[in-house]
């Protein structure tokens, strides 16, 4: 696709101290580097290598991704609500891939 | 379909097809070339196209033949200066997914235009026509053996209700024509080229066969 695109979903509001689920899905081919094209040439590796989620600047979740992960990787995880703030999601990978999304979190 | 695949389709935050729908939404309001109209300029809110996907293919009086939704989108964009999209290009699939997605939940309601009848009948014949080195017709597997197994996979009934679909095997979104071509090469036949009348006729027949079923785009399939 022409541009990196991601889907992020979190609850509209959460109570302080409660944990909530964050779901992320990023558009990426996750080419393993082991496959060959119709002509027999090796397809170059193109992976998302690292995902990170920062909650008001603090790292709350990170993951390293490898060749066995399917295209358009989906990651879901839980975060504990401390205060209203911003969640920043970053995907980094081969060939200078970098995509970032941010979402406001409303803590009541 | 396994419960896991169904759950993936039902939840928009897990369904990877929604990536293309989101891309289609942004293409909807962007003119294909400078100084021309975007989809939104003429059609307004995309919700106005609810019910379109469940009615296609329709008869195009100017071309004198039925056209499927993908073709209609390409023609409309060509009038606004867009180049002919490559089959299965992400941009084209994204617009198809976005337009089709508007009809999610509606029952399939094929157009009853009598001019479509001969093409639909031809589609029925293609469905029953043995092809390829394996000498199989669509009907042998998808009517006769649906629900059975082909290797590790369940043989589906062959309903076109969720296209473009996100297929786990493809690791991406693909059109009904891609799926039909896949079956054709599966029985060792020469697949009809993208946009071929055979594929549109088959789609006409399949939509009639699925009359009343709920629309699912973007569907997730194994």
Image (cartoon, helix red, strand yellow):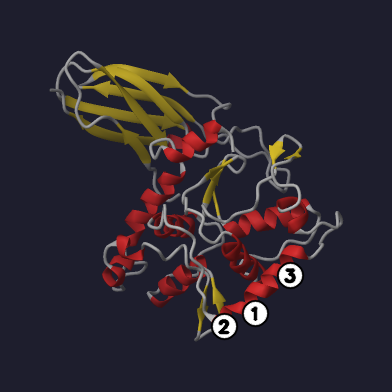
**Can residue A27 be seen in the rendering of this structure?**
no
SS at mark 3 in the image: helix
- Crowd around label 2: few <14 · some 14–19 · many ≥20 (10 Å): some
Q: Which mark is residue B32?
A: none
- Say which element carries label 2: helix
* Quarter of the rendering containing residue B11: top left
Foreground of the two, B170 or B3: B3
Q: Which residue is label 1 attached to? A: B118
- Residue at position x 42%, y 73% from top? B76
Horizontal side of residue B22 vs B215, given as left or right: left
**Tags 1 and 2 both on a single chain:** yes
B17 up-or-down from B83: above or below:
above
Residue sticking out furthest to the top: A17
Residue B161 pos. (x, y %): 53, 54
Q: Earlier in the sequence, mark 3 or mark 1?
A: 1
The 10 Å Cα crowd at callout 1, few under 14, some 14 to 19, many 20 or more, is: few
Residue at coordinates 57% horizontally, 83% vertically from top-left?
A: B115
Which secondary structure, mark 1? Answer: helix
Residue with the mark numbered 3: B125
């Amino acid at each position: 696709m022409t541009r990196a695109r991601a889907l992020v979903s979190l609850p509209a509001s959460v109570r302080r101290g409660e944990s909530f689920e964050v779901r992320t899905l990023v558009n990426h081919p996750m080419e393993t580097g082991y496959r060959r094209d119709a002509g027999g040439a090796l397809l170059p590796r193109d992976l998302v290598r690292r995902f990170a989620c920062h909650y008001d600047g603090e790292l709350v979740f990170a993951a390293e991704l490898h060749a066995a992960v399917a295209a358009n990787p989906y990651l879901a995880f839980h975060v504990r609500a401390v205060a209203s703030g911003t969640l920043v999601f970053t995907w980094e990978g081969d060939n200078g891939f970098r995509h970032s999304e941010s979402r406001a979190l409303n803590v009541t | 379909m396994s419960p896991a695949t169904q759950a993936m389709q039902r939840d928009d935050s897990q369904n990877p097809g929604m990536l293309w729908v989101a891309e289609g939404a942004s293409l909807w309001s962007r003119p294909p070339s400078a100084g021309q109209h975007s989809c939104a300029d003429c059609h307004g809110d995309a919700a106005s196209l609810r019910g379109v996907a469940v009615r296609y293919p329709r008869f195009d009086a100017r071309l004198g033949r039925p056209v499927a939704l993908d073709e209609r989108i390409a023609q409309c964009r060509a009038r606004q200066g867009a180049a002919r999209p490559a089959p299965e290009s992400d941009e084209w699939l994204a617009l198809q997914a976005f337009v089709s997605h508007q009809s999610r939940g509606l029952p399939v309601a094929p157009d009853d235009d009598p001019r479509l009848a001969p093409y639909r009948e031809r589609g029925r014949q293609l469905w029953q026509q043995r092809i390829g080195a394996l000498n199989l017709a669509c009907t042998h597997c998808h009517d006769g053996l649906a629900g059975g197994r082909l290797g590790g996979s369940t043989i589906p009934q062959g309903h076109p209700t969720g296209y473009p679909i996100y297929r786990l095997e493809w690791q991406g979104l693909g059109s009904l024509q891609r799926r039909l071509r896949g079956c054709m090469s599966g029985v060792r036949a020469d697949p009809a080229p993208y946009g071929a009348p055979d594929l549109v006729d088959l789609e006409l027949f399949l939509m009639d066969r699925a009359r009343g079923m709920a629309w699912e785009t973007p569907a997730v399939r194994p």
